[in-house]
Amino acid sequence: MRHFSLVVSFVLAASAAPLLAQDGAFKEFKSWQVNCSQTRACDMRQFMAGSAISGFELKRSAKPQAPVSFAVSMSEGVLGEATGDLGASLSVDGSAAVQVGAAGIALGEGGWSATLSGDFIGNGLVTAIRNGTKLQVELFRGKTRVKGEIQLAGAAASLLFIDEFQNRVGHTDALTAKGNKPPNPEPELSDMASLADFPQEIQAAFKDDGLCAETDESMLEGNALAHRLDKDRTLYVTPCGMGGPYNLPYAVFLESFGSIKPLVFPTMAEGGPSTMEVAYNLAYDDKAGTFAAFFKGRGIGDCGTYSTWKLSTGAADTSLVLTEERVRDCPEEVDENASTDIENWPQVWPRE
């Protein structure tokens, strides 16, 4: 039995509103790639071909005074096969190493990756990375050791970009551009990286008999978020169910005054207005309060269903309102010269 009250009423709006994509940011500084998401969570990563440590990533959320964590990728899963105490050490340019004990290491499945946690800002390691030339990283388990060296050219610019994107420049919790301003308030948007991040009522939807059964928890990171609309209401957007090769289903839940329910997606079916519990390849613009979904009829994206919705908030209820829907059947043969612009697809709502 599902633990939610399903919204069955919906409204079809008579006019379409364009979706304004709320993107993150991507920058490259030397060999570093910096990614920042819609929730302002950022990471800077580097890949090292031919090294026992094949990737190194520094991650930080947008929360005030958020810690930094490191994600390490390895070319072999030898730590997963080893036995003994787990540990790690990190040093810059041969300086005294920062030690990380087993409690601060989460080893990935098979031992191919590890996440390191600790006070890397307070112990000066982040500052050393900013000012240094090379970072030496070693992970060990018993007598088994994995070593690697990360070039730090571009690291200072990457850290500054993260501070700028997270609006920390001049604040006490900046990584590199510190000032006297107090940390910013808790952000309205936050990442939901695991099922444990959700309220229990939503966690129930991921059980075998729930709306989002068979969801791979690894899909949540970077794809699920919570948006605090006001002090009484929070919106949750999450992958929901098993996706196909090019279509990932999403659900939207609303927590309002202590009660949680899924919001349904109005759609135009062949027989008339209908609703869906999930939408595919969903994008959310938190500033405009709009959603867009594109169910691909096939991988090249030249056919399928494109829909947009507006979040409608009233005194009594909050719901999704269909603002536009376009459908194109998949032709038997692919015409490489044909236009695939969605704006030219047949419009089923609003009715022309």
Image (tube, helix red, strand yellow):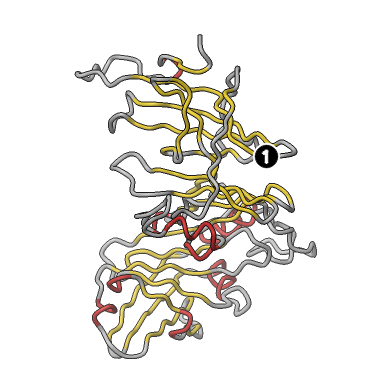
Provide the secondary structure element on which disc 1 rests.
loop
Q: Nearer the viewer, residue 187 or 337?
A: 187
Q: Farthest residue toward the front?
A: 1
Residue at point 65% right, 34% down?
Answer: 312
Q: Quadrant of residue 268?
A: top left
Q: Quadrant of residue 57?
A: bottom left
* Vertical comparison of 284 with 37: above or below: above
Q: Disc 1 marks which residue?
A: 317
Q: Position of residue 178 (x, y in %)?
A: 71, 64
Q: Is residue 302 left or right of residue 99?
A: left
Q: Nearer the viewer, residue 179 or 317?
A: 317
Residue at point 44% right, 82% down?
Answer: 89
Q: Is residue 304 left or right of residue 177?
A: left
Q: Disc 1 residue type?
A: Asp
* Vertical comparison of 208 with 69: above or below: above
Q: Position of residue 186 (x, y in %)?
A: 70, 59
- Look at the image and tell me in which quarter the N terminus lies: bottom left
Q: Nearer the viewer, residue 330 or 93?
A: 330
Residue at point 72% right, 39% down?
Answer: 316
Q: Position of residue 223 (x, y in %)?
A: 47, 50
Q: Farthest residue toward the top?
A: 352
Q: Quadrant of residue 335?
A: top left
* Vertical comparison of 49 with 288: above or below: below
Q: How many marks?
A: 1
Neighbour class for label 1 at 10 Å: few (<14), some, many (≥20)?
few
Q: Position of residue 276 (x, y in %)?
A: 45, 35
